[in-house]
Structures are given as structure tokens and as C-alpha cells.
Image: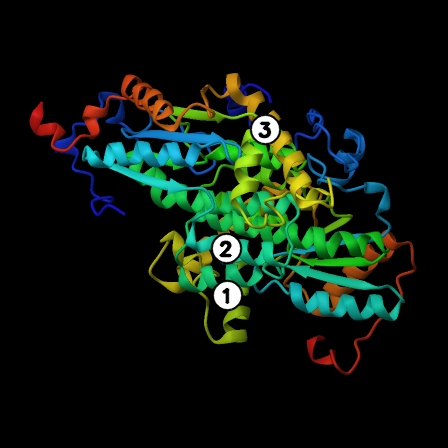
Amino acid sequence: MPTNVTEPQDQKTAPRPEAAKSTLPQPGRPVPSRAYPGALIVVEGTDGSGKSTQLYLLKRWLEIGGYRLHFTEWNSSPLVKSATRRGKQRRLLTPTTFSLLHAADFADRCERQIMPLLQGDYLVLADRYIYTAFARDASRGCPPRWLRNLYRFAPIPDITFYFRAPLDIAVHRILSGRPKLKYYEAGMDLGLSYDRAESFRLFQARILEEYDKMVDTDNFVVLDGTIPVNKLQKQMRDIVASKIDLKRFAPHAAEAE
Amino acid sequence: MPDQEKDKEKAAAALTATADATSAPVPGTATKTPTEEEASQYFYGEALVGFDPSEITGSLIVIEGMDGSGRSTQIALLQEWLESEGFAVQTSGLRRSNLVGRDIDELLAKNAVTRLTLSLMYATDFFDQVEHRILPALRSGTVVLADRFIFTLIARGVVRGINRDYISGLYAMALRPHLTFWLNVRPETAFAREFKKAQAISYWEAGRDMSLSHDLYWSFIRYQTMIKREFEVMAKRHNFIELDGEASVSSVNKQLRQRIADQLGIRATKYTPSAALAHLWR
């Protein structure tokens, strides 16, 4: 966690003009994407699509360059972790409570890390974002409109990379690398199949379908998760460099101007 | 998936907006999806996933009111009365879920949580109880006495500046109670009663997180007055049965029993509490 979170050095970092009048949004209201000076890059995709590897490499590239950034992961808030673990272990979670608990986790990270850092002119990288909830929870039967409302407080990303890999490839990557799939991970709660691997496959197929529906409505940048890692990373870096004014997040950006 | 921008503009499923509740079909779900008409009869907006409303044979009775309004006293008495009349009774209340009840207690004790996260944890607690406690009871013909319901949770969120449509939308899948009673008391009375109970007022009861006043008494009064105003708004919209919570326990109890007897289709019989509960009767 960077140290100068609460006191952004406004003078030095020279926020964009439209950011000058930014005020903290009311919780639960949609956050206009230019209500803050920072930038948000998000990766999405099914399990095994390669998204985490690619975001890691993007992060390394930016870190090595000394850029001001913060990395955040889905389902990682310490505040909500014990509840999620207990719910999963004892299989207490229904589609509704599964969804709400993940929203609580996200709200905690959003209110305490993502929003303050975006206000404080940081580049924020998120491994999975609200679209994971939209795809996964809709696959579990939650009403899409209810889900959209649930995450209305989330800032809209500057770039959402969608790593798309064919079902067979993605499923094979997971099944060959993991000794045992967990109950909810495999979507066993949906009652699709008694066989965990088969259940996982059917669940992932639904999720893939839900992701595909969002490509246009949510401005996903679709990347092919099957091409070699270094080539894919090059594409990702090029897109980031073309869409985001990285200089603003570089070390001593203000002095250079 | 509807267009995101449009969707974000429109307030999703507010409690009142049941008429235009056009829930998009969910592809390939194995669970039964009630029709819209069924859904709006039992829920505020959206139907709960995997729930068949025709299974409900019990009654859901909600008692709302601020701390010190006499809710728990009345629920204890009503439970005894209903059981003596031969009804199975289940109770529910805030922070009583197996899933997150204790986690919320911890968050409150540490005071290390933001308002939105806390609201969502309460929503998780609420729906866990709906799905694991309230619905199973209602399916088996039980009378459910709920000590507070979504209305307290909505009021607490709204006074803390959370968007009203947002928080109402969260509870769009909440069951509609058969009866909702509001035990209305003045904050000053509630303060005296609460103080007498514990010789102290808790941080959250007094709304200390809202920085209303450094003086505990005034913080309590201002906070509970704000909550009360939200209840006044909801009382009309959601057909609360408002009772004077400052009247005697026996008089409030009598009014509750009359309305509940009507709901259950029984005659309102005389009731005097057993020795175990006699101390509540004043």
C-alpha cells in the first residue's frame, strides 16, 4: 500500500482540469468515469483465460518503469474474508448471499482503496472487477437488473480487457493444473452435474456466454487468450500506452513538465 | 444484458416500482422462476432465486421501531400467546444469521468499516435469514415474528447518505410481510428506556459514526429523529400499522393481538402472560 494515499500532492501532480472540481460521490450513485484524476485498468475473463498472468506482466512493466500504481484483486478484502471462507466451507451460500458477500468485499476495497487512490491520481490495476460478478452471479440465476444496481457505486474502468479463450482450452488449463476443484468454484451449488470436472465445464460455459454478452454494452477490449504470452503482453502494453496518458503516472511527472 | 449506461441512469427496482418489474429471463436456470405477477405479490421487485411462492402457508409479521420502543418485549409476549393458541413460531432479527451475524458484531466492535460495506453485510445477513430461516418456516405454516426488517436497514443507510434507490434496490428481493407494525416512540423516551436497560448508550445506537454531536444524549436524539423521519416516509408507502409505543405494554400487546388474530383468522382471545414473562407486563 503506497503511503501518500490520503494526501495527494495536488501541486506536484497537476490533475486534469475536469478533475479539479471532483467531489466524493454519494455511495450507491454511479461514479462518472472522469470524476477523479486517476485511471482504472481492469482484466476479465473465465478461469484459465490467462488474464492474471497478463495483468501481472503489465504490472511488472509499470512497476519497473516506476509508475504510481496500485494492484487489487477480486475477493481479497480482509474484512469480509472470514465470512466468505465460512460460507464456502459450510456451504451456506445461496446465489443471493454469494452475490451480496462478494459485493460487500468489493465495496470495502472500493471505498477504502480504489476510490481514494483514483482521487489521489493513481493508476489502479484490478484483477477481476464487477463484470466477474455480473457473469458469475447471472449464471447462478441472480436477476441481471438487481446485479447492475448492486454494483452501481463502482467507477467505470478506463480500459476493460476481456481475455477470451475457447472453453476447451481454458478448462484444460485449470483441470490439468489443479488437484481438486472447490465446491463453489466448480459451480456444484447449481446442481448441473455430480461430477466436479463436468460441473465446472458447464458452469464455465455459462459464464463465457455471459461475458460475451457484455463485450459491446460494456466496451470490452477483447484479446485472444490463446496466443503466446509475450505477444499478447505486447498487444496489451500497446493498448494501455495508446489509451492512457502514462506520463502522468511516471516518477517526477510534474518536474518534467 | 441491457445497455449499461441506460441501466446505470435508471434506478433499478425501487421498492415502489413493482409495476414495471420486467425481469429479464435468466438463461438456462434449473430453478423455477415465478411469473412477474407472483413475484410482485410476494416480493418488492424481483423474485428470489429458486423460490416458488405458492409454497407459502405461514404468516410473516414484522415489528419495527427504534431501540427502546418495546419490540423485543412484545415479541416475547406474542410468541407465548401464539404458542398457547397452537401456532408454531419462528423469530428473526438483525445480525442473527449463521453466515455473517458474528462478523457484523466484530465489524461494529472494531468500528473499522465504511457505510456501504456495512449496508451490504447487513443485506447478506438479512437474505441468509430469509433463505435459511424465514422461508423454510413460512413453507411449513409457521408464524414468523421478525424483530426489525428491511425498513430499519433502509433508514440507517439513507440517513448515512446512501442513495435511496440503491438501497431499496438491494432489498427488491425481500419478502413482503403480511403485517408490519411500527412501535412509534419519541427519541427522548427511547433514550430513557435504553439507558435504564444498560446504564449506557452504545456507539451505534447513538449514531456516533455520523458526528452529529459530541454529547451522547444529543447525538442519540438527533440520530433517532433522522431515523424516525425515514420511518414516517415509509409508513405511508408500505402500509405500516402505527402503534403508540409509549402506551402500556398490555395495551400495545392487545392491539397487536387483535390485528394478528384477524390475519390468522382466529378469535382474539384473552391473554395474560405466564409467570416466566409476568415481569414484562406493566
State if disc 1 and disc 2 touch (CB < 8 Å). yes
Colour mapping? rainbow
- Which residue in the structure is indicated by mark 1? B191
- Between A43 and B45, the one nearer to me in the picture: A43
Between marks 2 and 3 in the image, the one whose residue lies nearer the viewer? 3
State if disc 3 and disc 2 touch (CB < 8 Å). no
Mark 3: which amino acid? Leu
Rendered residue at 55%/52% (across/down): B122
Residue A27 visible to an observer of this rendering: yes
Between marks 3 and 1 in the image, the one whose residue lies nearer the viewer? 3
Which x, y percent locates residue A244? 28, 21
Between the C-alphas of marks 2 and 3, the distance is 54 Å
Which x, y percent locates residue B144? 76, 57
Which x, y percent locates residue B46? 69, 35
**Disc 1 secondary structure class:** helix
For residue B224, the mark is 2
Between the C-alphas of marks 2 and 1, the distance is 9 Å
